[in-house]
Amino acid sequence: MTFTGMSTRGHLTRQSYKQASEDSWVIPKRTDTNLLGPDLPRLDGVTWTTQTRSWYREVRRSDIASIYTDAEWQMVLSTALVHNAIWSGNLPMRERQTFQTELRQQLSALLLTPEARKKNKVVFVDPDPLEEAFNRPAAKKQDLKAMFAGEAVIDQ
């Protein structure tokens, strides 16, 4: 199942239908461990802090990352710059507070905080097993038969 962006709204599977209301953003939990999105870029004058590298890796592994568009990944990279500036320790206190406010706003806009997900009714659901079977690179007929063993079928 491929998602193209934040416009993915509504029910995606029978299972999600049971688990979420119609006004929720239903997003299947990721079953892989691949990192999504671009790597942190090499930028003149920017040394990525350990905290920012770790944070960015977790964003790339998150369930919400599966719906980000290219434009949203650009915003994630911009957010990484703000995050990095805070953790670098080079900001005066007044600027640090401004950057922290900006960071909170960007994290919320990207649905990376529990509060933002709750406010926007984001629901992560387990992927539909049937859909998972069909989306595997080599879904085999015997795998599908095993999945439905004991079920009444019309055609053998």
Image: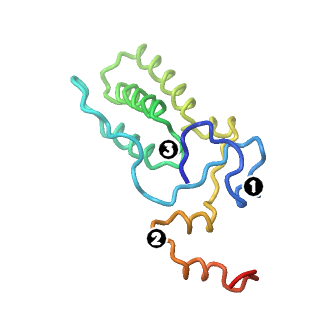
Task: List the single residue furthest toward the left.
Answer: 44
Q: How crowded is mark 2: few (under 14 residues within 10 Å), some or many (20 or more)?
A: few
Q: Distance between the residues labelled 3 and 1?
A: 22 Å
**Is 24 or 84 nearer to us in this picture?**
24
N-terminal of the pair, mark 3 or mark 1, is 1
Marks 2 and 1: in contact by CB < 8 Å? no
Marks 2 and 3: in contact by CB < 8 Å? no
Mark 1 lies on residue? 17
Mark 2 lies on residue? 138
Q: Is mark 2 on a helix, strand or loop?
A: loop
Task: Identify the amino acid type marked 3.
Answer: Ala
- Horizontally, residue 4 falls left or right of residue 96, namely right
Q: In which quarter of the image is the C terminus?
A: bottom right
Q: How crowded is mark 3: few (under 14 residues within 10 Å), some or many (20 or more)?
A: many
Residue 88 appears at what percent x and percent y?
31, 28
| Residue 6 disc label | none
What residue sits 49% from the left and 21% below the top? 102
Marks 1 and 3: in contact by CB < 8 Å? no
Task: Identify the amino acid type marked 2.
Answer: Ala
N-terminal of the pair, mark 3 or mark 2, is 3
Residue 154 appears at what percent x and percent y?
75, 80
User: Which dot, 1 or 2, sits closer to the camera?
Assistant: 2
Task: List the single residue furthest toward the top.
Answer: 94
Q: What element carries label 1?
A: helix
Task: Identify the amino acid type marked 1.
Answer: Tyr
N-terminal of the pair, mark 1 or mark 2, is 1
Residue 41 appears at what percent x and percent y?
29, 33
What residue sits 36% from the left and 37% below the top? 52
Q: How far apart are marks 1 and 2 (CA)?
A: 27 Å
- Horizontally, residue 154 falls left or right of residue 3, namely right
Mark 3 lies on residue? 65
- Horizontally, residue 24 falls left or right of residue 83, namely right
